[in-house]
Image (cartoon, helix red, strand yellow):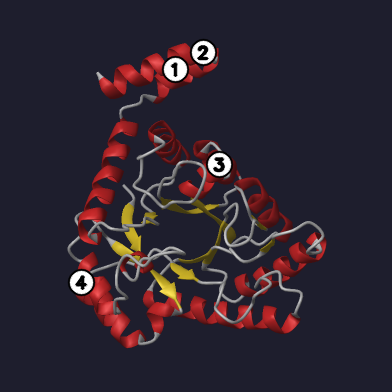
Amino acid sequence: MNKLAIISAFLGGVRNRYMQYHPERELKEKFAIASKVDRLDGLELCYPADFSDVDLLKSLLSDHGFGVPSINVRSRRTGKWLRGSFSSAIAKERNEVVDDFRRAADLAAEIGSPRISTCPLNDGHDYVFEMNYLDAYNYAAETFSAICEHDQSLKVCIEYKWNDPRTRCLFANAGETLCFCQKTGIENLGATLDIGHSIQAGERPAQSVALLSQSQKLFYVHLNDNDRNWDWDMLPGAFNLFEFIEFFYYLNLVGYQDDWYAFDVLSKEVDPLDHFNLVTKLTRKLEELSGRLETDTLEEIFKHRNPVKSLDYLYSVLFE
């Protein structure tokens, strides 16, 4: 069974571009909330925000018995790297990014985290003829290579996303991210599969599991849901129930086990403790529903490619 974690930022000052729903919270306050969430095993920490006092952080982790599945390294910063970080055309900026990620990698080793993950949200473009795509991918390959070689025992994960804040991100879907990872040839560079991002990109998330896992590039998983129009970071299974069940089925099938799920879920007006208690409950329920499906039966159904038989089997197993 995979362990469950919350991205620490979602326990703090939750906001969108129009409103702030929760107050800013100190690290101790975030841990205090997390410690009361049922079924929770750890926190995905954010760099640099959570690392202003590393001794305090290590003490809090020890006191609460929390694991750290990943350090979420923010690659967009207010007032800098405005034209992208990994793909910036300015060598000085790319060098700053490398140095910053190397510090994060050292901190991951210090607190016992097996990976760092980043969502290159500002690496991309808004208009046609805005950027040189060839240069952008080459610069990104150079930057990620320098980051990954710093500690080759540490997994470095690219969390792909279709857009926001760019109208089109450079790493927008599973295929683009996999192609880039294979281009670099770096063994410890792979993908974070955020199911909400996958859904927004028009993917079948289970198919993306299969694609990434067959190349050994499925490094990490984030859970949330949306209506396919925007990355709303909603409760798992709220909109795409069958996609979630198929997603968990394939994660188990490809051997993504004894690892971690991290929640990228926005509580908005709801009390975060109530919200994340339901998030963890829904996740375990979705796993249980997925576990009802028998591989031998599905394999026989797959041979005939008959959706009538597929849906009849799903409804009979899940809802009767």
Say which of marks 2 and 4 sits in front: 4
- Residue located farthest toward the front when viewing the structure as drawn: 18
| Residue at left offset 21%, top offset 67% | 33
Question: Which amino acid type is marked by label 2?
Answer: Asn
Q: Give the CA distance from mark 1 to mark 3.
A: 20 Å
Q: Mark 1 points at which residue?
A: 310
CA distance for labels 4 and 1: 45 Å
Name the residue at 27% across, 43% down: 282
- x%, y% of residue 250? 45, 36
Q: Which amino acid does label 1 sit on?
A: Ser
The residue wearing badge 3 is: 208
Whether tag 2 and tag 1 are in contact, CB under 8 A, the answer is: yes
Q: Give the label on residue 121, or none.
A: none
> CA gap, disc 2 to disc 3?
22 Å
Q: Residues within 10 Å of mark 3 (few under 14, many from 20)?
A: many
Q: Mark 4 points at which residue?
A: 32
Hey, what amino acid is under mark 3? Ser
Q: Do the residues labelled 2 and 4 touch (CB within 8 Å)?
A: no
Q: Are marks 1 and 3 in contact (CB under 8 Å)?
A: no
Residue pointed to by mark 2: 306
Q: How crowded is mark 2: few (under 14 residues within 10 Å), some or many (20 or more)?
A: few
Callout 4: SS: helix
The tag earlier along the polypeptide, 2 or 4, is 4
Residue 112, above or below 225: below
Residue 238 rendering spot, x and y as whole percentages: 35, 40
